[in-house]
Image: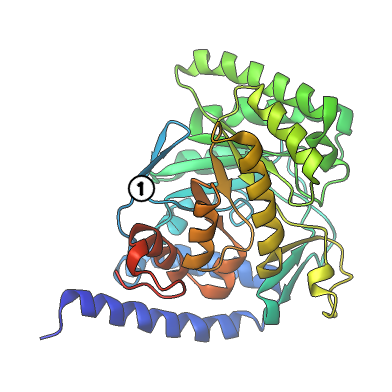
Amino acid sequence: MPSWHSFLRIKSWSFNIMYSLLRNLLFILRPEMAHKVSLRSLALAERSGLGRLILKQPPENPVECMGLRFPNRVGLAAGFDKNGAYIDALALLGFGFIEIGTVTPRKQPGNPKPRLFRIPDQQALINRMGFNNEGVDNLVTNVSRSHYSGILGINIGKNMDTPIENALDDYLTCLDRVYSVADYIAINISSPNTQDLRSLQHGQKLDSLLDGICRRAEILSKTWMKKVPLAVKISPDLDSMAIEYLAKSLLNHPVSAVIATNTTLDHSSIKNSRLAKENGGLSGTPLKEKAQATLIRLNEMLQGSLPIIAAGGIASGSDAKTRISAGATLVQVYTGLIYKGPCLINQISCCLAHSSTCAGNTCQP
């Protein structure tokens, strides 16, 4: 008789084959349409109960970070579910935490289409979405309706038409609205697709923004009788001196974590692709080295004083192990999930929980 463990392996193998076939069909569609179809299909699987029968949950591998207990180290990066409309469905995949958004105070359409491009031979994406979302009130309503009991991060930003000198007002508006329903709040100052947003990572603009946000968070903590950690999401395109300044600024404010990194504007790694000249942030495998280098430099500057959540080009257990070894406490996936499928979460979680028997791209718990 086959063991239950063998059955789970067969089931996981079968699901991988099924996803490979499904991905081929999805890739016939335009990327944004494929994304919508995928989320709606996952929601249907969640409502019908089918998802619980098919999807294997990762092993327990709890870790403390930002004063929170994460059941495993693998999270979903922001951007996958901008409006928090699919939280319960995404929870089926076994994430240790889910980050939704980026959300802005007011609804906005984002940049003109097409604005999302696949580069399959390099397992990469280029996006210039531009914070398209239904607005913060809609997101809060969706969160309130969900049944998810895990750790939920909410990523906040500014509206495209808000002058950069008034950016703090938008962040405070979002902070006020999401504080009561978030387990942590991510401050997005690194998207390359909103004009001048990345300038907030530097100098007095950074210090003023963090000062204003942290002061408001302190007031909100007393209002709601709970302390919600703040994380800052940074760019992989910062030079060494900029990372040094940013790290010092983070340590001078009551920030709880830093997310490294967002997408990159450096397309040199895909220069032979026909899509290399498309504007937008590059994610996936070509981002791996820049994100890793940023993490290493950041860790050198922080000296363990602030936890780092690693993102950017993580598409296997070995990728995640490398980031953890370089100083990260948690990891997030996005593009890797699109190319590898839902089993990626279990595979990475398994590798991190059973590192002595992990082969990198496969897991032998």
Considering the numbered disc 1 on the image, is that residue within a helix, a strand or a loop?
A: loop
**Residue in the foreground of this view, choosing between 173 and 240:** 240
Asked if residue 159 can be seen in this view, the reply is: no
- Amino acid at pointer 1: Pro
> Does residue 104 sit above or below 270 in this rendering?
above
Q: In this view, does 269 lie to the left or right of 34?
A: right
Q: Name the residue under label 1.
A: 71
The quadrant in which residue 234 appears is: top right
Residue, x 58% and y 35% (percent of image)?
303
- Which quarter of the rendering shows the C terminus? bottom left
Residue, x 58% and y 13% (percent of image)?
219
- Counting from the top left corner in percent of width and height, residue 4 is at 17, 75
- Counting from the top left corner in percent of width and height, residue 15 is at 39, 79
Residue, x 75% and y 45% (percent of image)?
190
The quadrant in which residue 81 appears is: bottom right
**Residue in the foreground of this view, choosing between 156 and 230:** 230
